[in-house]
Image: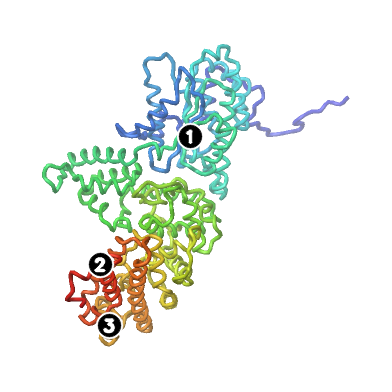
Amino acid sequence: MSTISYFQNASKFVATNTSFNTYISDVDVLQYLQQYAATGAMHDSDERYPLPLCHPGTRKAVIDRIKAWYGYKEPPEGSIMVVHAPAGYGKSAVAQFIADDLEQQEDIDFNPLAGSFFFSRASPERSNPAHFIATLAYQFATSIPELLPLIQDVVRRNPMVLNKTLELQLEKLIIGPFRAVKSLDEMPNRLVIVDGLDECINLDRKAQGQYAQDQELAQVRVLDLIHTLQSHRFPLSFLIFSRPEPWIKAHVESRPFNDNTHILDMYRTADNLKDVESLLRKELEQISVKSGCQSSLEGEAWPGQERLRKLVEKTRGDMLYARTIILDLEDPYEDPQERLDLILDPSFDDGADLAHSAPFSFVYEHFRQILESCPKRNRPLMLEVLADLIVSHQIMRDADIIPIEQGDISLALGTLDELSGRVRGRGIKALRGLHSVIKLRPHRSGSSPFFLNGLFIRFLKNPKYSGEFTVDIKSASLRLLTACMGKVASVGLDTKIRDDDHCLRFAVLAWPSYWWRWTLIDGSEYSKILHLFLSLNLKACFVHAFSLHPGRFHLTSLLPENLFEHIPAHPSTSPQSANQVLPETIVASREPEYPDHVELVAQCIAHLRSSVGAALVHLLDLSLVDSSIQKQPLSRALICYLTHLQSKNEGDRRSDAVVQALKRSHTSQSNGFGHLIESDKKNYN
């Protein structure tokens, strides 16, 4: 039998990173374990300074719900609570408050906080799940005395366990030691806090271009590790904070995870506007004392109740936005009154220059990181959908066209998909990674149906801040306007618009709003839009718009002076030579930029003017026989029309078709509109 001789004839042989006969003393075990832990992820780490804090009196509803759920004497029925909220709503501050509050308990003889892990996309260690189990094991060894010798024994016997898979680390370093505790039933229930799960993104994979996809796997893997640990029914509860990313929500709400899980929607539970007002009021008061700012109204603290109200409205209840404003106003090199004037100015949302503002730059970097976490192959479509939303969100909020309040956000996005030539459902998929800044759920009254943070809109629209993530608003406006006008091109008075034809209903109601928002891209597109306008049966469009939503029918915006106010081409001749089809305000406003389109614009305005009158006549005549016609909105439209008619000469007023219809109405006395001209007979008789 021959003997094998290893390393025979080897020279200059050096062995490194060996593990033969490795032995770690008891004293060194915690130090060894610490090398594999992300100590900066612990709740009291100096790496996280300054720690996020809840402003006194804010987030009380959320904190009370968490305290009611967790009990160190009696474990909760469900050992996991997942708290989710969009970016900037104070999740980390609440997590920090709970951790600090537990450690400050004086009426108990043990530490109820077993451990914590605060993920952060800005840190390679804290964004990587590889350190998750080692960090918890290190904290368990120091906060749960019964586990210390058992964890020490595992590491001492097999130091290489810390290089194994996370699942094996969990089994060896935590589950095994818990099983070995003899008096486990007598051990008090402790809490584990995991914050920022959505920021577990495998940052070290970013350079490989894979982390956008890998982050979903990493975050779900952490959830599975937590679920595995709680399934053993050890005296541990888990409090998880995260943005409402769809893959996280789907996993948490699936079985068997949801069988033992409470879900708390912080966005719905907290009184966000009230909390923001409380924060702003207190912080602005301190700024006022330091800087000597005074309110313009005697007896009111700076900045005054009305300006405070506008500031709260601007934040939309977003605590991140509110804190950013405060930090900006605290800049020692700036005048807080001037900065506040800038922030409250209507032009602020359109991109006032804040490039030198560190607080706002920080928030914009935060948005950039969120967008970078989305797969590159998806970004062009994602930016197209975001542009559609920016152009449309105000229209949908003001017109109340699609029932978003009832939760039909997917219906609104599906409508935009159809108008933009996308397959229905593509829009909501394109926003999959943006649930922390896009509100894909029922909205509260007065807020944007889609955007959770007004700063996100500013960021996307300004290339100085967003760079490669700048959205093309001009193209989106033109695309949606053209699509809406194309939809309504086939609409006539006899067209039956079904309740479930959401796209056509939206197009009939929304195309004037898109018209006001579109800006010229090039001459060929301009000509195309004007010809499309001439092809519309505007009379039918206006009648259907009134029938679909009488309360939102505003005739003022449909008058030529308003609808064509922004059109660059106009006749170079006087109104008289153009048969007075053009308002004088339009003729005098600009020099003609597109002389070839002058006659085309004149035809469009004449078409609009005659159609508005024809639609009102039709509705008046219809009101004689149809009692369902709402009289108050129609009366409001008629008053607007007659007021506008006052600028015409006497002959035009008397012969106007709407006036003639009102005279017939006055004679019949059947619909009650005749009184509108009765008080001013000299102008109409």
Image quadrant for the C terminus? bottom left
Crowd around label 3: few <14 · some 14–19 · many ≥20 (10 Å): few
Q: Nearer the viewer, residue 591 or 310?
A: 310
Q: Nearer the viewer, residue 57 or 621?
A: 621
Q: How many marks?
A: 3
Q: Residue furthest left?
A: 298
Q: Quadrant of residue 684?
A: bottom left
Q: Label 2, on which residue?
A: 639
Across and down, in percent, residue 220 comes to 56, 38
Across and down, in percent, residue 483 comes to 47, 67
Q: Amino acid at mark 2?
A: Ile
Question: Which numbered mark, 1 or 3, is in the foreground of this view?
Answer: 3
Q: Who comes first in sequence, dot 1 or dot 2?
A: 1
Q: Nearer the viewer, residue 433 or 32?
A: 433
Q: Amino acid at mark 3?
A: Gln
Image quadrant for the N terminus? top right
Q: Label 1, on which residue?
A: 263
Across and down, in percent, residue 90 comes to 38, 38
The dot on residue 580 is: 3
